[in-house]
Image (cartoon, rainbow, N blue to C red):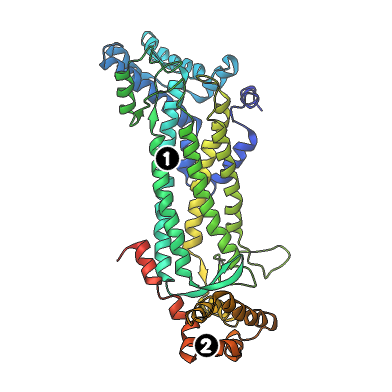
Amino acid sequence: MSRTELWRTLRGFGRWPPLRETRRVIARYTRPELGRIWSDQNKYRQWLEVELMASESLAELGEVPREASQALRQHAEFDVERIDAIEAEVRHDVIAFLTSVSESMAAAGVAEHSRWLHYGLTSNDVVDTAQALLLKQASEPIAEQLRALHGILRARAFEFKDTVMVGRTHGVHAEPTTFGLKLANWYSEIGRHIERFDAAREQMRVGKLSGAVGTLAHISPEAEDRICAKLGLKATAVSTQVIQRDRHAHFVSALANIAATVEKIAVEVRHLQRTEVREAQEYFSKTQKGSSAMPHKKNPITSEQLSGLARVVRGNAVAAFENVALWHERDISHSSVERVILADSTTLVDYMLAKACDLVRRLLVYPERMAKNLESNGGLVYSGQLLLEISAQGVLREEAYRWVQRNALRAWEEDGSFRELVEADPDISAVLGPEDYERAFSLQRQLRNVDAIFERVFGSE
């Protein structure tokens, strides 16, 4: 480990070898733009863009010579390795960056104009505003992935709208449903995530150039507005030395919420793939291997991976909330945390959404097995409707419940036909006739409102 890496590790500045290895692993599966967005090269590029926009805006307001802002735009550059070397000595990343930029100006023969670099700014004016630009860049692919998953869920929901299966509560057979309704639920949930994430990233689309304690002592409100507008951001109405971290906590919590729903989908797939259920299954290629010891195995490895990664993102959300309370006008306890959680959370959620899209799109569904499982309980899934039919005939609900339950328990224990037992029960037969039984044990009646639910979710297309 180099002196620079060791120093950053001790300072908690996030260039930790385990973190680098994690990102290398994730980079093999996620889109390359996420890696580029969170690279040091791009981070310093955004820092430089903030500096240049600041000098240009101040030049427009007559506070910086125009020739200086033009020279900065034309010649200002940086070198990542040089920044690392300087930082190892000065122990301040922004100063190291500014020194590297100033050296590029000197090399171009315009050193005199470098005095207008960072004019009126403090370090976090640059860092926080540039971080907003990085988050804006990182949010775009996530928003695209959300909408892609939304579309895939819609298509598969209609594909299986009328595919009947047993619904389960507490893992136990409950009443009939359809696989399409399950997918419609996920579709609706992802739709809410789209709205929440759009709102969260909009709240993060802010910059600040208000100085060391947020008083705009050296930059005017007009200049701050102008600089932020040039960057595609809005100026915060009020800040300290930093943008307030409730915004970041909201953003990361939105990511954690997305990850939770992805895990929800993954957990359902894992349950449906169990040998005893076998109603759905992750795609398994002909060359894929499930176990080194058991050749028959087809394991839900993608779903299990998604469940695990969701835990990481949720943990990052906790860290983001811890960052809200800083000392007075700022401290740097949030800085080391954000160097880890912002890059990792956006990268992981982008990866999780890509894997979720693939999981749902290629999910193998077995309607015959669903029908078999529904029928395997001997009609117990109709106990609720039977209870209503008996109550409608004037029997007190408590009494009707006892009649139905005693037959349901017997059917459960003896693995028999619930309907046959019910029809042979003298108490129930005294109040119900053949038409009543047909109505109570009707699958079509149970699912008669599926179309109405789909219209609520998807509209009348």
Categorize mark 2 by other alpha carbons within 10 Å: few (<14), some (14-19), many (20+): some
Q: Secondary structure at mark 1?
A: helix
Cα separation between marks 1 and 2: 58 Å
Tell me the residue at 50%/30% (across/down).
40
Regarding residue 287, the answer to whether it shows in the image is: no
Identified by mark 1, the residue type is Ala
Asked whether 71 or 453 is in front, the reply is 453
Q: Which mark is residue 146?
A: none
Which residue is outermost to the top? 112
Vertical relation: 382 (above or below) 143: below
Lower sequence index among marks 1 and 2: 1
Vertical relation: 405 (above or below) 432: above
Q: Which mark is residue 431?
A: 2
Asked whether 220 or 61 is in front, the reply is 220
**Nearest-to-viewer mark from 1 and 2:** 2
The picture places residue 209, in percent across and down from the top left corner, at 39, 20
Identified by mark 2, the residue type is Val
Vertical relation: 380 (above or below) 95: below
Tell me the residue at 44%/80% (across/down).
444
The picture places residue 373, in percent across and down from the top left corner, at 58, 77
The picture places residue 41, in percent across and down from the top left corner, at 47, 30
User: Which quadrant, please, contains the C terminus?
Assistant: bottom left
From the viewer's perspective, tell me whether residue 189 is left or right of residue 6.
left
The picture places residue 225, in percent across and down from the top left corner, at 31, 23
Q: Which residue is mark 1?
A: 200
